[in-house]
Image: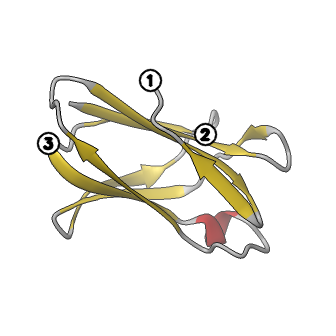
Amino acid sequence: MSFSTHVLDAVTGSPASGVHVRLEHEGRVVAEGRTDGDGRIKGWNPGAGVHRVVFDTGAYLRETFYPEVVVTFTVTDPERHYHVPLLLSPYAYSTYRGS
């Protein structure tokens, strides 16, 4: 199983670079890092089960209603790739199961 994410800044219309992201499984941090210049993190391999990806949006945005965005998802097939993108603005966010 591989995992990636992509954070896009909806205000500027550009990738959100430098966002701190951590991946948790069963209450433990299994990976963490910062989005690159294209707003991406890739290559994490957390395995099957329920996971949480936590975005530190408060450190990225000067003013935000959501200082942290947490997306919980289930890996049912460890052989597949899982992509969780985040579209971010100070007062809204959206996510979906990417490819």
Q: Which of 20 and 13 is in front in this view?
A: 13
Q: Which of marks 3 and 1 is nearer the N terminus?
A: 3
Counting labels gives 3
In the rendered image, residue 86, in percent from the top left (x then y), is placed at 58, 46
What secondary structure is found at the residue carrying circle 1?
loop
Distance in Å between CA atoms under marks 1 and 2: 16 Å
Distance in Å between CA atoms under marks 3 and 1: 17 Å
What secondary structure is found at the residue carrying circle 3?
loop
Mark 2: few, some, or many residues within 10 Å (few <14, many ≥20)?
many
Image-based side of 3 in relation to 77, left or right: right
Q: Mark 1 points at which residue?
A: 99
Q: Nearer the viewer, residue 65 or 4?
A: 65
Image mark for residue 37: none
Q: Mark 3 points at which residue?
A: 48
Q: In which quarter of the image is the N terminus?
A: top left
Q: Name the residue under label 2.
A: 39
Q: Relative to residue 35, is residue 78 depicted above or below?
A: above
Mark 3: few, some, or many residues within 10 Å (few <14, many ≥20)?
some
